[in-house]
């Protein structure tokens, strides 16, 4: 039991943070903003998905760069599995966003730079998956995928981080037309928001680790020695 | 609006989360065991 905790404490911490976000997320007082009202609590469950996605894809970028500098195939395995987990969080973000949008704005999608940017980014990473499948040889695939990963991440920065800020008249928080802004995030909400992100990121790393192990097993089964 | 009802929502979501977490721990252990088996067979 103690050995289990010693090895896996960080996983328990991650789950703990998420559990805390579920409990506190519903119990704390939140600002009553026009239009979104109580659904502002979705910050803890929808927005956190995006932050987690970005951290996982950033991790993948680092792994791709490490592969390019060492040519140790282990980094490539982490790169692809980080993308897989990142895409899962991205899809969660898209779907929950559409649910929230339909409720709040009356439509699941709008012609909004933030929304379109997020969608394009996710498509770019699905293209990464397709690219990988087109190359059979392990090292060639790793190298080409790693280079593509760098470009994909640059696109992420541009489409999610830069272009939305350049526009105005967006319904999304942080831009022109929304009652909520990023900088004035309520202090009490921050107390739930940040631990929630930490929790999901930890779980993201955990998932990536499991997928890497499965990859190892798959490699062994495919290449009997 | 009865506020005590929110506790039911919290209870439900917590159950789902803990259930998923438990499954993940089980899966983790299973996969780690398989990986060890492979590493032992290689040696």
Image: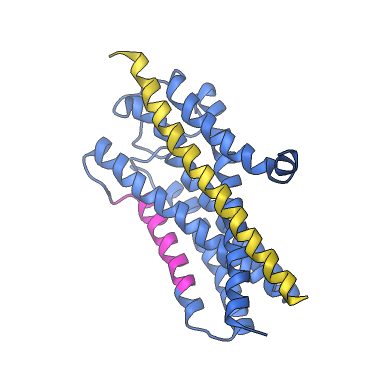
Side of A191 relative to A127 (left or right): right
Quadrant for the N terminus of chain A in the image = top right
Residue A92 in view, yes or no = yes
- Identify whether A74 is placed above or below A195: below
Place of residue A5 in the rendered image (x, y in percent of width and height, measured from the top left): 71, 40
* Residue extending farthest left: A106
Side of A109 relative to A189 (left or right): left
Q: Main secondary structure of the magenta part?
A: helix
- Seen from the viewer's position, the closer of residues A42 and B18 is B18
Place of residue A155 in the rendered image (x, y in percent of width and height, measured from the top left): 50, 63
Residue at 51% across, 47% down: B23
Colour assigned to chain B in the rendering is yellow
Residue at 63% across, 70% down: A216
Chain in blue on the image:
A
Tell me the magenta residue range: A111-129
- Give the image quarter of residue A20: top right
Place of residue A49 in the rendered image (x, y in percent of width and height, measured from the top left): 47, 45
- Seen from the viewer's position, the closer of residues A171 and A70 is A70
Please tell me whether residue A117 belongs to the stretch shown in magenta: yes
* Residue extending farthest right: B43
- Identify whether A206 is placed above or below A150: above
- Seen from the viewer's position, the closer of residues A101 and B5 is B5
Residue at 48% across, 26% down: A23
């Amino acid at each position: 039991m103690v050995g289990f905790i010693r090895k896996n404490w960080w996983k328990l911490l991650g789950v703990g943070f998420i559990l805390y976000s579920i409990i506190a997320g519903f119990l704390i007082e939140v600002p009553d903003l026009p239009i979104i009202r109580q659904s502002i609590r979705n910050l803890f469950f929808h927005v956190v998905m995006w932050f987690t996605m970005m951290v996982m894809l950033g991790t993948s970028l680092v792994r791709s760069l490490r592969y390019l500098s060492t040519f140790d195939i282990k980094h490539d395995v982490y790169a692809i599995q980080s993308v897989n987990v990142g895409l899962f969080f991205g899809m969660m973000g898209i779907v929950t966003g559409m649910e929230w949008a339909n409720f709040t704005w009356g439509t699941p999608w709008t012609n909004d730079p933030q929304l379109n940017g997020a969608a394009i980014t996710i498509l770019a990473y699905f293209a990464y998956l397709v690219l990988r499948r087109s190359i059979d040889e392990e090292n060639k695939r790793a190298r080409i995928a790693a280079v593509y990963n760098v470009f994909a991440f640059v696109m992420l920065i541009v489409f999610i981080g830069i272009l939305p800020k350049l526009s105005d008249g967006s319904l999304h928080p942080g831009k022109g037309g929304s009652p909520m802004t990023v900088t004035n995030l309520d202090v009490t909400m921050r107390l739930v928001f940040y631990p929630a992100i930490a929790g999901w990121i930890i779980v993201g790393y955990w998932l990536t680790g499991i997928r890497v192990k499965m990859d190892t097993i798959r490699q062994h089964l495919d290449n009997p020695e | 609006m009865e506020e005590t009802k929110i506790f039911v929502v919290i209870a439900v979501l917590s159950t789902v989360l803990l259930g998923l977490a438990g499954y993940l721990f089980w899966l983790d252990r299973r996969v780690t065991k398989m990986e060890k088996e492979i590493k032992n067979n290689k040696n």
